[in-house]
Amino acid sequence: MKRIWLWAPFILFAILIGVFARGLLYPTDRVGASGMVGRHMPAFVLDNAVPANPALDSKQFADGKPRLLNIFGSWCQPCIVEAPMLMQLQAQGAEILGIAIHDEPDRLARFLATNGNPYVQIGLDPKSRTQIDFGSAGVPETFVVDGNGVISYQHVGIITPDDVPIIMAKLKGVQ
């Protein structure tokens, strides 16, 4: 009987490790709730990132027209993977504006020439200040913004083929 009590703390510890590992490996909710959804987007004015695309100002999002805002970087491998999905969203009628973080105009121009340019406008956020104001911690990240400048949906990570109809529905739902 004493042997069982000697092993009890180790058994309890192993059970706790198993419970924590299961929670980390198989979370019940893989989408984190954003504090920005339902709120007005932060105010910003960004210089144009490449000469072919005009600068970006948050006031443009309050003209009655819903849009997508994609935060990305030319150095970002997941952004390269996501590029065809953004082109598909554009082909389906989505107007996409971009914020390029920690980037340089010549690198962006090469990125867009290689992967396509779905952006109507691209603002350059060299120090990620605007990205941080959006509560974004990584790239890529995409927001559906209604015609009043209110964020109605946030997609964290790469947009996959399965996500395209969801994002289009969210975009059409805010018209």
Image (cartoon, rainbow, N blue to C red):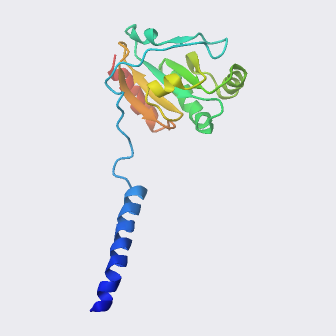
When the figure is inspected, residue 125 is found, relative to residue 167, above or below; the finding is above
Looking at the image, the residue that sits furthest to the bottom is: 1
Using residue 138 as the reference point, say whether residue 23 is left or right of it: left
In the image, residue 51 sits, relative to residue 114, either above or below, namely above
Picture quarter containing residue 169? top left
Query: Which residue is at the far left?
Result: 1
Question: Which x, y percent locates residue 27?
Answer: 37, 53
Residue 106 spot, x, y in % from top left: 73, 21
* Residue positioned 39% across, 46% down in the render: 30
Describe residue 13's horizontal placement relative to residue 44 as left or right. Answer: left
Report the front residue among 26 and 134: 134
Tally of numbered discs? 0
Instruction: Point out residue 55 in the picture as x, y percentages from the top left corner.
Output: 57, 11
Task: Out of 173 and 135, give the one closest to the viewer.
Answer: 135
Instruction: Give the answer, above or below, for where 23 lies relative to 56.
Output: below
In the figure, is residue 136 to the left or right of 115? Answer: left
Relative horizontal placement of residue 2, taking residue 51 as reference (left or right): left
Please tell me which residue lies in front, 136 or 173.
136
Residue drawn at x 51%, y 20% as measured from the top left:
96
Image quadrant in which the C terminus is located: top left
Q: Residue at x 42, y 12 (%)?
A: 61
> What residue appears at the point 44 percent right and 9 percent down from the top-left corner?
59
Horizontal and vertical percent position of residue 139: 54, 34
Query: Hey, which quadrant is residue 115 in on the image?
Result: top right
Quadrant, the N terminus: bottom left
Residue farthest to the top, as pictured: 63
